[in-house]
Amino acid sequence: MSAAQRTKGFSPEAQEAIEARALTGAWELRRLQRVLGELTRFDETNEAATRKARNIMIWCIVLGVVSLIVAFVSFDDGLMWVWLGPVVMTALAVLFGMKWRGLKKLDLIDDFRKCLMPALRDLAQDVDAGKRIRVRMDLAGPVERKQISHGNVDPGRYIQVKETVYEDPWGEVRLPLVDGSTATLEFKAWWTKRERKYRGRAGKIKYKTKWSKKYSATATLLPAVERSWDEEGLRSRTDGKREKAQLVQKEGVTGARLERHWVFKGVGGPPGDAPPAKEVVGMLLRLFGAMRGGSEVAR
């Protein structure tokens, strides 16, 4: 199924976001949720197609090697047709390899559907339905334009380690709330790819690729009018190892900001993990709890 077929019936906004691998603008909550739902359906379908193409490619490579061995064994018997197997399997491996790479280029990062969508669902009753949500999302993940460093690093016990780092401030959402205050959620990831060359126990040279994904989510709450804050109470409810809280001066009022960090790891490919939505929503609730007079929104 082609990308056009998988997006058939989707809204123009969703089709444009899929093509650009980005979503921006000012949105009504329900409309934003519908478009994110369409992006989710596309991404899940595309991931399934990508896995299928990769698996077929691998099987073609395996069958190609097997058929090549059979061809060599049968060559002395004058069976020239046995070379057809390796040729066909090689051609199919190339074909599905090209399809696999093409599908990977359409992939969207999982973060928006694993973290942002459920967070928006949990916060829906607190959002002012008469106002628009401002959104900036880059859904491409760790691509070349986000690369900030690349090269060999200290290999330690390995023969060689090549490291590539990507900086990805992929999302920012500004939410107008029913009490007149404004909440902002910002997401940023640093992807590190390490390609390791080492010698196995039998002396054979081997390669392994590992990924790490350092993550920060920042919640900011700005009241509609100047209010006082229980700064000491907020900091007492902050995990000093993973979080940082502070008051900020922005848009003419004193607001509060809470930043939290996570680390995810993967082997072979970039990890698809994202911060749990309940923890991100919990950050905003703690800010509401620290805003004196803001309990009408905090749950």
Image (cartoon, rainbow, N blue to C red):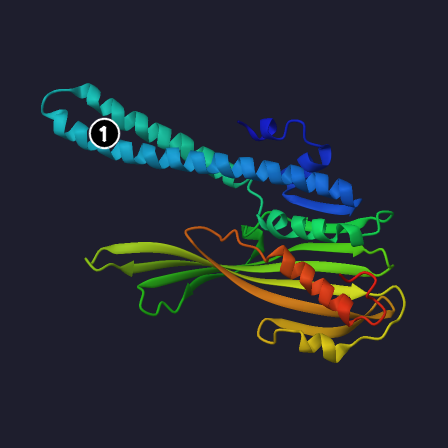
Residue furthest to the right: 225
* Image x and y of residue 10, in percent: 68, 31
Question: Relative to the observer, which residue lies in front, 85 or 289?
Answer: 289
Amino acid type for the residue under numbered disc 1: Ser
Which residue shows up at 68% across the image and 42% down it?
36
Question: Relative to the observer, which residue lies in front, 118 or 188?
Answer: 118
Relative to residue 154, is residue 299 depicted above or below?
A: above
The reply to whether residue 219 is in sight is: no
Judge the density around disc 1: few (<14), some (14-19), many (≥20) Cα neighbours within 10 Å: many
Q: Pick the quarter of the image with the C terminus.
A: bottom right
Residue furthest to the left: 76
The reply to whether residue 152 is in sight is: yes
Which residue shows up at 74% across the image and 50% down it?
135
Residue 58, quarter of the rendered image: top left
Residue under pointer 1 = 67
* Image x and y of residue 249, in percent: 81, 72
* Image x and y of residue 20, in percent: 65, 41
Relative to residue 247, is residue 179 depicted above or below?
A: above
180 on left or right of 243: right
Dot 1 falls on a residue whose secondary structure is: helix
Question: Relative to the observer, which residue lies in front, 59 or 151?
Answer: 59
265 on left or right of 65: right
Relative to residue 68, is residue 199 depicted above or below?
A: below
Which residue shows up at 32% across the image and 59% down it?
197
* Image x and y of residue 84, in percent: 25, 22
Which residue shows up at 85% across the image and 49% down it?
131
